[in-house]
């Protein structure tokens, strides 16, 4: 028997039937505060686009909390340089969009630069 995903004891179907206030009771305090304040005009417009579009929706709303209504939709989140495609999965509920579109890359250093000393330019051959 396959394992059924639950979020704080609720199945996906139960979560999608919940009102926003009921879902807010399940998330952590910071996200609860954000949800209970309500959505601003830009966030409402984004939710309307997500409801009616089958294609990925572009957004700069990195601070938007992922709610059950957004499950299994595709969203392009801007990380400051490029658009990162996110497919919203049940594990992402209660998190923010920006957590999944990283803004910094891992630093990869190459060979020593112009001002390097002779000893630091030595790289052992393997």
Image (cartoon, helix red, strand yellow):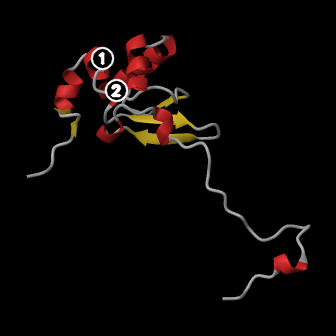
Image point (23%, 34%), residue name? 8
* Residue that protrudes farthest toward the left in the picture: 1
Q: Position of residue 21 (x, y in %)?
A: 29, 15
Between 115 and 77, the one lying in front of the other is: 115
Q: Secondary structure at mark 2?
A: loop
Image point (33%, 27%), residue name? 27
Residue 48 visible in this rendered orientation of the protein: no
Please tell me whether residue 32 is drawn above or below residue 110 in the rendered image. Answer: above
Please tell me how crowded label 1 is: few (under 14), some (14-19), or many (20+) other residues with Cα within 10 Å: some
Please tell me whether residue 50 is drawn above or below residue 100 in the rendered image. Answer: above
Q: Position of residue 19 (x, y in %)?
A: 25, 16
Q: Secondary structure at mark 1?
A: helix
Verify CB contact (< 8 Å) between mark 1 and mark 2.
yes
Please tell me how crowded label 2 is: few (under 14), some (14-19), or many (20+) other residues with Cα within 10 Å: many
> Which of the two discs, 1 and 2, labels the residue nearer the N terminus?
1
Image point (34%, 33%), residue name? 93
Residue 120 visible in this rendered orientation of the protein: yes
Asked whether, in this view, residue 25 is left or right of residue 116, the answer is: left
Cα distance in 3D space between marks 1 and 2: 8 Å
Between 20 and 52, the one lying in front of the other is: 20
Image point (30%, 17%), residue name? 20
Q: Which disc number belongs to residue 67?
A: 2
Question: Which residue position is annotated with label 1?
Answer: 20
Asked whether, in this view, residue 125 is left or right of residue 89, the answer is: right
Q: Position of residue 78 (x, y in %)?
A: 57, 35
């Amino acid at each position: 028997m396959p394992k059924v995903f639950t979020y704080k004891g609720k199945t996906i179907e139960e979560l999608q039937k919940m009102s926003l206030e009921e879902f807010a009771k399940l998330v952590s305090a910071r996200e609860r505060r954000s949800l209970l304040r309500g959505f601003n005009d830009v966030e409402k417009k984004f939710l309307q686009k997500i409801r009616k579009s089958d294609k990925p929706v572009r957004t700069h709303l990195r601070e938007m909390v992922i709610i059950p209504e957004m499950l299994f939709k595709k969203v392009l989140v801007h990380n400051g340089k490029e658009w990162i495609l996110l497919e919203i999965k049940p594990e992402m509920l209660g998190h923010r969009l920006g957590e999944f579109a990283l803004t910094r890359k891992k630093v990869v250093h190459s060979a020593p630069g112009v001002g390097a000393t002779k000893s630091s330019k030595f790289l052992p051959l393997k």
